[in-house]
Each structure stands twice: as C-alpha cells, then as structure tokens.
Image: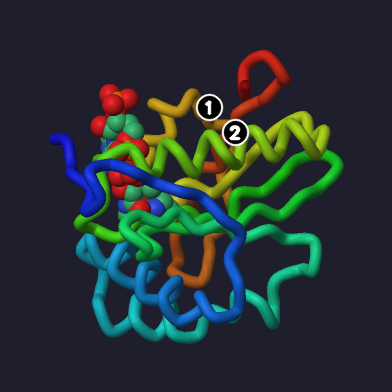
Amino acid sequence: MTGELRDGGHITTREATREDEQRLREIAFTAKATWGYDRDRVRTWAETLQLFAKTPPTAEIYVAETAGLAVAWMRLVPGNESCILEDLWVEPISQRAGVGRRLFRFAERRACQLDAPRLEWEAEPNAIGFYERMGGRHIRDTPPNEWGRTLPVMAVFPSAGEAA
Ligand SMILES: CC(C)(COP(=O)(O)OP(=O)(O)OC[C@H]1O[C@@H](n2cnc3c(N)ncnc32)[C@H](O)[C@@H]1OP(=O)(O)O)[C@@H](O)C(=O)NCCC(=O)NCCS
C-alpha cells in the first residue's frame, strides 16, 4: 500500500518548537491509536507527553511538514554509546508515503554526525516490519514496561558511508 501526501509529496524537516507541542501530541495519539490499542488509554498517554519540560535538554525533536502542516515527528536523545530514537510518529493519513523513512534516515544521519556508534529504539511490535526495512536489527528485549509489555530493542549502526 502506498499513501499520498497532501502537497504532492513535498516534505520538509525542521526542528520542533514549543508551539508545536499540542500538534505533536495529536500526531502521537492518532498514530499510536492506528494499532487498535484502547483509545482512552492512548489519549491519556499522549495528552500527558511533556516534550519540552521533561525531555533532557540535549534531546532533539524534529517535525516533518507537508503543505505547511506537521504530519510526523521524531525525538532523538544523544548519548556516547548510542543515540536513542525515543519517538517516531506519522499521522495516519500520511503513513506509507515515505515520511517515516525520511525521518528515520534523518535520525541516522544525526547519530552519525554526533559520532554515536549506534542508533537504537524500543520497537512497537506492529512497526517491526518498517524498522527491518530501515535496516534495523534486534539487539535485546526491554524489561516489561508500564503497559506490561516486553518490547524488542532494535538498532542500526550508522557510519558516514551508510547514513549519507
Ligand atoms: C511505523 C511508521 C513510523 C512508518 O512510517 P511510514 O511513513 O508509514 O513508512 P514509510 O512510508 O516511510 O515506509 C518505508 C517502508 O517501510 C514499509 N512499512 C511501513 N510501515 C510498515 C509496517 N508497519 N510494517 C511493515 N512495513 C512497513 C513501507 O511499505 C516501505 O517499504 P518500501 O521500502 O518497500 O517502500 C508509521 O506508520 C507510524 O507512525 N505508525 C504508527 C505509530 C508507530 O508504530 N510508530 C513507531 C513507534 S516505535
């Protein structure tokens, strides 16, 4: 299945600002809800996301826009051993149109620029196919999280050549 973007596929990426926060919560809510999880629970989770107040100051949040509207975002937490991809959310009507790939490749390039030997993330089980398409490999499992779930941790190992 291939999606279509509002603006004929023209996507720009920029750093998020505090003014984006509510829109980013909406994107996270609608994106996570596509997997059929309890909507009230997902809404509560999204509405309490504190993207600027509670994120470490070194974290970077990027937004993908099309036709002047944010349609996806990701959060990257730099570290010496690894950069963590904390979030990657694409609003439902913009899924399967290459936006996730674009943000993921952007995260890979940032990890490379930051000299992190790997980019890792806890993978939503329904998104594992996407991450495998991005070259991700399973490296371990998490302990059970607040949803009572154990998630696979996946990683890519960007080098200047691969992430270019
Ligand atoms: C998973 C997600 C980030 C992927 O972003 P996207 O913009 O829809 O994906 P893209 O269009 O860039 O797809 C890139 C490739 O992955 C494939 N793909 C996308 N989603 C997939 C999925 N869920 N399962 C298997 N393959 C998938 C696409 O078909 C495409 O394949 P190609 O290389 O053959 O063209 C997005 O669908 C999303 O936000 N989903 C809901 C929330 C979520 O699960 N986020 C991840 C939290 S860890």
Q: Is residue 154 visible?
A: yes
Element under disc 1: strand
Q: Residue 121 has which mark?
A: none
Verify CB contact (< 8 Å) between mark 2 and mark 1.
yes
Q: Is residue 51 above or below residue 127?
A: below
Q: Amino acid at mark 1?
A: Arg
Q: Earlier in the sequence, mark 2 or mark 1?
A: 1
For residue 47, what is the image quadrant? bottom left
- Give the residue displayed 45% in from the left and 38% down from the top: 102
The quarter of the picture where the N terminus appears is top left
The residue carrying mark 2 is: 155
The residue carrying mark 1 is: 137
Element under disc 2: strand
Q: Is residue 125 visible?
A: no
- Give the residue displayed 28% in from the left and 69% down from the top: 30
Q: Quadrant of ligand 1?
A: top left
For residue 29, what is the image quadrant? bottom left
